[in-house]
Amino acid sequence: MKKLFLAVAVLLIATVSTVKSQDRLLRFGIKGGANLGKLDGSGFQDGFKLGYHLGGFAQLRLVKGFGVQGELVFSSTKTETTDDFSKIYEGVSTADDRKKINLNYLSIPLLANIDLGTPRLKLQVGPQFGALVSDRKVLGAAKEAFKGGEISGVAGLWLQLPIVNVSARYIIGFNDVKGLETINSSNWKNQSIQLGVGVTL
């Protein structure tokens, strides 16, 4: 009987503390996880490649069921050129065929948090602004193969458990990140799927 009483008491305390934490106006935390990314454009291998992301966030509850979330995230993905990359684009050499490229971005997502029937589960949508922090001179004959920044759209789900958060989101680039001056009109746009876990304080 004492064990049952103790278990119920612990459960009640955990529930009350969770509800109180859900009602807080401002919350902070950290998150990280897998980053499945690809560069959509002529001359690049199709399919998502595994990378990672790591960052921090701040959540602001504006009204019941709605808030905003800002993040600062470092994300790293990989891509690879095709066998005929040098034939598609002028000014590059055959050494750039089948070349592996790392793309590292420092991104700032600004998201709306919309409760889906419960404050634990949220729909997240909004823009993301990213700055390329890895070397842009990745192709032998090109000064800068990639532009320094990009604008993306984000949509995903956020599950808030006691302390731990779990997230899944899809990110699609809106602007052409190609820095090459070429007659080929193909756009280069980033896409990624982020699966993350973190701690909310």
Image: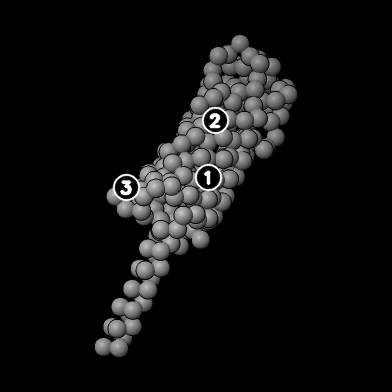
Q: Which mark is residue 151?
A: 2
Name the residue nearer the viewer: 156 or 5: 5
Residue at position x 46%, y 36% in the image: 126
Residue at position x 31%, y 86% in the image: 3
Name the residue nearer the viewer: 139 or 96: 139
> Tag 1 or tag 2, which sits nearer the N-term?
1
Residue 66 image point, x, y percent: 39, 46
User: Eyeballing the image, is 114 above or below 148?
Assistant: below
Secondary structure of the residue carrying tag 3 is loop
Q: Is the image coloured rainbow, by chain, by secondary structure, or in one colour?
A: one colour
> Tag 2 or tag 3, which sits nearer the N-term?
3
Residue at position x 54%, y 30% in the image: 151
Residue at position x 58%, y 13% in the image: 184
Circle 3 residue: 116
Evaluate if marks 3 and 2 touch, with contact meaning CB atoms under 8 Å apart. no
Q: Residues within 10 Å of mark 1 (few under 14, many from 20)?
A: some
- Callout count: 3
Look at the image and tell me whether residue 107 can be seen.
Answer: yes
Q: Amino acid at mark 1?
A: Gly
CA–CA distance in space, label 3 to label 2 = 27 Å
User: Eyeballing the image, is 178 above or below 195?
Assistant: above
Name the residue nearer the viewer: 65 or 175: 65
User: Eyeballing the image, is 143 above or below 105?
Assistant: above
Circle 1 residue: 70
Secondary structure of the residue carrying tag 2 is strand
Evaluate if marks 3 and 1 touch, with contact meaning CB atoms under 8 Å apart. no
User: Eyeballing the image, is 75 above or below 165?
Assistant: above
